[in-house]
Amino acid sequence: MPKRRKRRSHSRNTLAAQIRQLAKTDTFAAALLAERGKQFSEIETLLNLYYETLQLSRKIQAGEKTADEKLLEGEPGWTKERAAQYRSEIPKSLQKFAFQISQIVIDAISARDTSKIIEIVEAIEFLKTPHECADHWRYEVLTLKHFLINQGDEWEIGKWATSINWPDDDGKNGFPQLRRLLKELDAPLKPTRRIRKV
């Protein structure tokens, strides 16, 4: 009798598939997965938020604009009041993350939980290790998606393409590849206005 061939699994567990699946429930976690190629632990996520917010805080203190502010400049809904609110939220967030981290450290010390202390140290080492983005385009889209959802905003396809430096070749045909990627990740895409022919 001939040997039966093993069936190939149709559900490939590629990084892109993992990102797509996670993006359905947690955009921020999916963006981190796209950046580093692995899902972050709870302490890695918290420390990453702290470091990123600390960087934003230092930029503002130095009188510089953050990347988010540069992106939103010129947008109709980006008023002075909204910009001021954005800036005022950053030190509050930094204080919140700092408190959460210090609480985890104090709890670990109180419980003499050396494994938790080691986990924190390893998370710091992991986050400071230089790396290349595991999935550049999905990371860019998911980072902006997370930001836009928080701002209650959506962008037209041209704005998306400009913001993430999408290849010009795709733009010649109306960005079909970028549209597919935005749809895959359920990114907030504003419908393109159609000009009626007279």
Image (tube, rainbow, N blue to C red):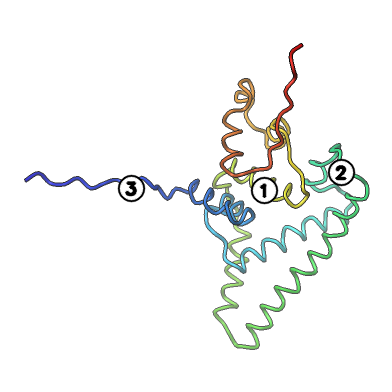
Percent from the top left, x then y, of residue 180?
A: 57, 35
Q: Which residue is mark 1?
A: 143
Q: Residue at x 6, y 46 (%)?
A: 1
Label 3 crowd bin: few (<14), some (14–19), many (20+), radius 10 Å? few
Vertical order, 198 against 110 (above or below): above
Percent from the top left, x then y, of residue 178?
A: 60, 33
Viewer-nearest residue: 144 or 113: 144
Numbered mark located on residue 9 in the image: 3
Label 1 crowd bin: few (<14), some (14–19), many (20+), radius 10 Å? some
**Hey, which quadrant is residue 191 in on the image?**
top right
- The span from disc 3 to disc 1 (Cα, nearest Å) is 31 Å
Q: Earlier in the sequence, mark 3 or mark 2?
A: 3
**Hey, which quadrant is residue 97 in on the image?**
bottom right
Q: Earlier in the sequence, mark 3 or mark 1?
A: 3
Viewer-nearest residue: 51 or 174: 174
**Cβ–Cβ below 8 Å for labels 2 and 1?**
no
Q: Residue at x 58, y 28 (%)?
A: 176
Vertical order, 74 against 44 (above or below): above
Q: Residue at x 53, y 50 (%)?
A: 19
Q: Residue at x 58, y 47 (%)?
A: 133
Relative to residue 95, is residue 30 drawn left or right? left
- The span from disc 3 to disc 2 (Cα, nearest Å) is 48 Å
User: Which corner quadrant holds the C terminus?
Assistant: top right
Residue pushed farthest top?
A: 198
Amino acid on which the number 1 mark rests in the picture: Thr
Relative to residue 173, is residue 10 drawn left or right? left
Percent from the top left, x then y, of residue 142?
A: 64, 47
Percent from the top left, x then y, of residue 47?
A: 67, 65
Numbered mark located on residue 78 in the image: 2
Label 2 crowd bin: few (<14), some (14–19), many (20+), radius 10 Å? few
Query: SS of the residue at dot 3?
Result: loop
Query: SS of the residue at dot 2?
Result: loop
